[in-house]
Image (spheres, rainbow, N blue to C red):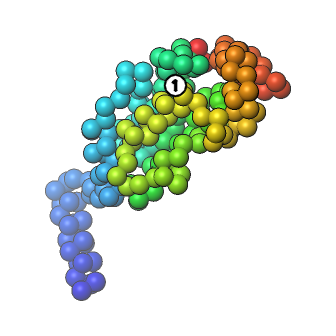
Amino acid sequence: MIRLFKVKEKQRELAGNANGGVPTKKQTAGELRLHKDISELNLPKSCVMSFPNGKDDLMNFEVSIRPDDGYYLGGTFMFSFQVSPIYPHEAPKVKCKTKLYHPNIDLEGNVCLNILREDWKPVLNINTIIYGLYHLFTEPNSEDPLNHDAAAVLRDNPKMFEANVRRAMAGGYVGQTFFQRCL
């Protein structure tokens, strides 16, 4: 039986080459699902998706988020997405490429969003993740932090937190950490 599959595969490959065509790469289930997710995206106007490696590499893309409300109003934040071939059974790897002062995003760009970790389910999709990231900017969560210092300031002194966010977004120091301008 296995030999039969190899013979059929070889025949398909020869037929593709005989027609002068390049043998087509078979898409993984993850690529098919991701293609469906992207075609059904319903993003807010403040979110933009781009493919830095071209449309042929759907599994790696970027999303820029420009919050229109909250502490981070006016900033532009870039996230990279790496999608596994076994997506949607494994959540995409999401990193923030913009260094920012945020309780749920550490200085290395790791993101603390429950649906990217323990609450991931295959019924969730890229749209859900992007809305989750957007929500982190409109409602930062000091209860589940990656940046414990920022979370403590948000919890104990929201006015100081807002001043720190503004200083970081304008391009300046918060404590000993320098942040690039992202306004």
The residue that appears at 70% across and 16% down in the rendered structure is 159
**55 to the left or right of 104:** left
Q: Viewer-proximal residue, 155 or 84? A: 155
Is residue 39 or residue 138 the one in the foreground? 138
Report if residue 139 is visible in the image.
yes
Provide the residue designation for mark 1: 138
Image height check: is 128 above or below 121? Answer: above
Picture quadrant of residue 55? top left
Quick check: can you spot residue 87? no
How many marks do you count on the picture?
A: 1
What residue do we see at 53% from left, 52% from top? 117
Give the quarter of the figure containing the C terminus: top right
Q: Is residue 34 left or right of residue 5?
A: right
Q: Closest to the observer: 78 or 163?
A: 163
Residue 54 percent across, percent down from the top left: 39, 36
The amino acid marked with disc number 1 is Thr
Q: Is residue 89 above or below residue 134?
A: below
In this picture, residue 13 sits left or right of residue 84: left
> Which of the 4 image quadrants contains residue 131?
top left
What residue is shown at x 32% (from left), y 39% (from top)?
38
Query: Under tag 1, what secondary structure?
Result: helix
Q: Residues within 10 Å of mark 1 (few under 14, many from 20)?
A: some
Quadrant of the snapshot with the N terminus: bottom left
Give the residue furthest to the right.
Answer: 176
The percent position of residue 29, horizontal first and vertical second, equals 32, 58
Q: Residue at coordinates 48% horizontally, 47% vertically from top-left?
A: 115
User: Which residue appears farthest toward the front when viewing the image?
Assistant: 156
Residue 110 rendering spot, x and y as whole percentages: 62, 41
User: What percent of the width, then of the height, locates residue 58?
Assistant: 38, 43
